[in-house]
Structures are given as structure tokens and as C-alpha cells.
Image (tube, rainbow, N blue to C red):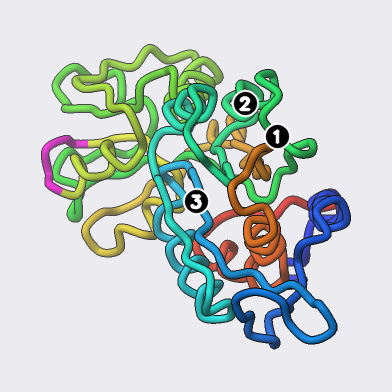
Amino acid sequence: MRPPGRPPALQSVVLGLLGVLGLLGCGASDPPTTGAGTAGEERISETVTVFAAASLTDVFTVLGDRFEAEHQDVTVVFNFAASSTLAQQITQGAPVDVFASASAATMQTVVDAGLIVAEPEVFVQNTLQIVVPAGNPGAVTGLEDFTNPDLIIALCSAEVPCGAAAVRVFEAGGLTPQPDTLEQDVRAVLTKVELGEVDAALVYRTDVLAAGEAVEGIEFSQSSEAVNDYPIALLAGSPNPGAAAALVEFTASPAGLDVLAAAGFQIPEG
């Protein structure tokens, strides 16, 4: 299998951002310093605030740590939550540098508000997977079990990306689920499974991988009907646009995409 490379569209938008900003003056091998460098070269030395979908929690934490290791004067601060919640906070004026959403629809809310520098680009994709507690005490075998009223089922609320994706897969299967609880983000759903509070749930396959031995994942054919695109964008009015652009560039780099792929995210082709 070809190792994941940088999606061409995302590469173009990153280069465009850097050209417009003209603020990035250091590479991964050239540790930044505060203020001007040699011959007036500007170095990034700031805090970057990133609003990111809850399903990006683990992998973005890793990417943030690696970015900070290469840019020692930069601190990355994350706010992880449901993409719809984050979009609402951004449109209400939250000071944010970068937004990474789990769906194009929630990103569009920010686009429509005129709050981005350039057109967002999809950097990874994700699909749903059935998740059950370790040992599968409910003997769940497929999506049809979500219609069983004797099982305790958790789903994301329909207004958040993981819930909207669940709606699509149930429609594709001609099924009407019987959820006992609807949660506001995918990590809240996963926690209920990890604690053994529910028999089954739908989360992203990356969340199943992140949970490790505490849960088991079950593939189902309808998952291909709901592939979630994850767009990323640099926000207009970013308090620290140079460092923010550098972080977007790092995320789109081969090293960044390798980390994302290892976490189970799909790298878009072409």
C-alpha cells in the first residue's frame, strides 16, 4: 500500500495561506525564536488555539505535542467538543486560530459567517463502527441489533456529525434504532461503552482503536454509506496567524498524515 501523502488540494490551500500571510519563517528543522531572526527573518512564537472535533482528541494531542517539540516557542491549546458546538462558539466570537471539523456541514456554518481565510479542505475521512464492551455481553452481531428493545443502545444526537452519520447508515439499512441515550459528542458515547453502561453504540472506527482493549469493534456493510469528511481551516481574525498556518502545514505534512493514518483515519486520494 502506498504510504499516505499530502492531499493535493490541502497542499494547495496550505501554500496559499502561507503566501497570503507571509508570516512563516521557520521549518521543522529550524527551531523558532521570539522576535526577528537573522536578516529580519520573522520567527513564530505564540499560542495557537485549535477547536477540533471530539473524535480528533487523541491524534491531535499527539500532533500538538510533536509540533511543540519542533517549534519550542509555540504552545498549542485545544478545545475538543462536538463540531456543531464548536462552530456555534466560533460564530459567537470565540478567539480561535484553527478549526478542524468532523463534517463539512458544520464547517459550512463558519464559512457562511465569513470567518475563514480560505476554502476549507478535507484532510482526513472517517467511518462509523459498532462498538461493544469487551467480551460483548449483549451478543451484538450487526446493525440490526440496534432495533432490539432488550439491548441498551447509545447513539450520538442527530445534530452532531457522528449522529448525522448514524442516521444515514440506519436509513441505508432500512432500520429504526431504539436508542436508550443520545449523547452530545462521540467521546461521551464511547465512555458509556467503556464503562459497560450500554450493550452497543455507534462511534468512529478511530475511537474504537483509541479505546484499546476496553471495547470491541464490529464492522457493518452500511458504514460505507456515511463517510465523514474532516475539513480544516485557518480562521479570519486569527490572533496568531503565522503559527496557526504552520500548524495547518504540519498537519498536512507527510509526518502529520502518517500519525493520522496510524490512528485509523483515511487519507483522501487525489
Q: Residue at x 66, y 29 (%)?
A: 115
Q: Answer whether labels 2 and 1 touch (C-beta < 8 Å).
A: yes
| Residue at numbered disc 2 | 110
Q: Position of residue 137 (x, y in %)?
A: 14, 44
Q: Residue at x 16, y 27 (%)?
A: 152
Answer with mark 2 or mark 3, whichever residue precedes in sequence. Answer: 3
Distance between mark 2 and mark 1 Cα atoms: 7 Å
Q: Residue at x 30, y 58 (%)?
A: 211
Distance between mark 2 and mark 3 Cα atoms: 16 Å
| Residue at numbered disc 3 | 49
Q: Hey, what amino acid is under mark 3? A: Thr
Judged from the image, the secondary structure of the residue bearing numbered disc 1 is: loop
Chief secondary structure of the magenta span?
A: loop
Q: Answer whether labels 3 and 1 touch (C-beta < 8 Å).
A: no
Answer with mark 2 or mark 1, whichever residue precedes in sequence. Answer: 2
Question: Is the residue marked by circle 2 packed among few (<14), some (14-19), or many (20+) residues within 10 Å?
Answer: many
Residue 116's label in the rendered image is 1
Q: Position of residue 96 (x, y in %)?
A: 53, 42
Residue 103 in the magenta stretch? The answer is no
Judged from the image, the secondary structure of the residue bearing numbered disc 2 is: helix
Q: Answer whether labels 2 and 3 touch (C-beta < 8 Å).
A: no
Please tell me whether residue 248 is drawn above or below residue 191 in the rendered image: below
The residue segment tinted magenta is: 195-199
Judged from the image, the secondary structure of the residue bearing numbered disc 3 is: strand
Q: Hey, what amino acid is under mark 1? A: Ile
Distance between mark 3 and mark 1 Cα atoms: 15 Å
Q: Hey, what amino acid is under mark 2? A: Val
